[in-house]
Amino acid sequence: MSIKSLVSFSLTCAAVTALVGVPALAADPAVKCESGKLKESGKYGFCRLKAESVAVKKGLSLDYSKCDTKFSGKWDKLELKGAGECPSENDFADLQNRITEHTDLVSLLLSGVGLGNEDPDAVYVATPTDGGADTATCGSQAEPCATIAFGLQPSTLLAKLRVYVAGGEFFEDITLSDGIDVLGGFDPDSWESAPGTNPTILYGSTGSSHRAAVTALNITSPTSFDGFVVYAAPATTLSSNSYGVYVSASSAQLVITNNVIFANSGAAGGDGVGGAQGQIGMDGDGASPPGADAAYDAFIAASAGFCNAANNRQFANGGFRSCGGDNVSGGAGGGNQCAPVAGSEFSGIDGAPGSGTGGGPGGDAGDDGELLFSGAACSVPPAPTAGREGSEGAGGSDGLGGT
């Protein structure tokens, strides 16, 4: 970049016409205003360089205050004369900043400090090892910022258009700014683009909620993200994701090229909604009609006579139900075993509890009877000799949470 090209300004069609000498437009307020601004802008740049020259020659402290005051006053007068028709009103501060950048670069080049390829419209970022530090004045090649996020702050960017990031490791999350290119892979010594030998590696930060190493929201102006190796951090909050680059509400103006991007592990999902309550179990068959359950009498099995151990049996009359492959049927009814023992619950068998969690307990079998003769009357044991119905099973428990 030559010093000659450092300060450049464009002319509008009206200004060009004025320069070629068309008489009809010579008194146009807009033409006079813009022509005057161009002239004063050049004077302002020269004033700054002259101030630097005087400071170097006389060994004085650098002072631009006279230039700033004079330039501001001339600018205001030109707008006043333009009678509200100046093509570029109220942009004094923006142009002043741009002239400042260019004249500062001229000073660096003349002093041998500048590298000769510094972009006045860029912020430079390098690791602390390579001289980076997040300060109020960082952003030049001589004084790069230390983090990309700091370089992307509005207060750091000002009127910049690009962020150049040197090779090295950066441990941070960044959010792209609309219209600001973020370019990695630069040599921190020469600031030449060399991604093959100076890779810029971005490691996303750990934390709660979703993780994204790079976020691009509402990018609708030409914006480039180029030259990075991106590693996202793993997500640890339930049901959260991990993104290498997360893009939302952005247009095709966002261009993501020449990067290697790695997402990381998402966190485990949270518990699903509890399953619906199981169906109510079916009723058991209950006792058979009188005479139909003779096969389960405590005394006779298949023919006349007293029962023996071969006649032991239980009434298989529980209600049947299967829920999702789980057997939640009722228990078998009571039965008998031989031979009866008077005064105890031996020959009767309690009903079995229902299957599955919450199945109702089986009915209590009746006690064996015994006739006692006390001389004048017979008596029976105090315990009931008739079997009791089993209880209903409880409602099924909730199903397991969904995956």
Image (cartoon, grey):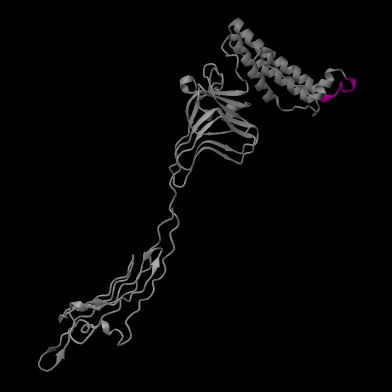
The spot of residue 132 in percent (x, y) is 50, 22
Q: Is residue 136 magenta?
A: no
Farthest residue to the left: give it.
375
At x 63% / y 8%, what residue is drawn?
Answer: 53
At x 28% / y 72%, what residue is drawn?
Answer: 352
- Res 72 quadrant in image: top right
Q: How many marks do you count on the picture? A: 0
- Res 73 quadrant in image: top right
Figure check: 117 above or below 171: above
Q: Nearer the viewer, residue 249 or 30?
A: 249
Q: Nearer the viewer, residue 279 or 292?
A: 292
Figure check: 308 above or below 31: below
Farthest residue to the top: give it.
57
The spot of residue 218 in percent (x, y) is 61, 39
Figure check: 294 above or below 216: below
Q: Is residue 396 left or right of residue 41?
A: left
Farthest residue to the front: give it.
303
Q: Nearer the viewer, residue 382 or 295?
A: 295
The spot of residue 43 in percent (x, y) is 72, 14
Which range of residues does the magenta coloring cover? 22-30
Q: Is residue 27 magenta?
A: yes
In the rendered image, the quadrant that contains the N terminus is top right
The spot of residue 254 in percent (x, y) is 62, 34
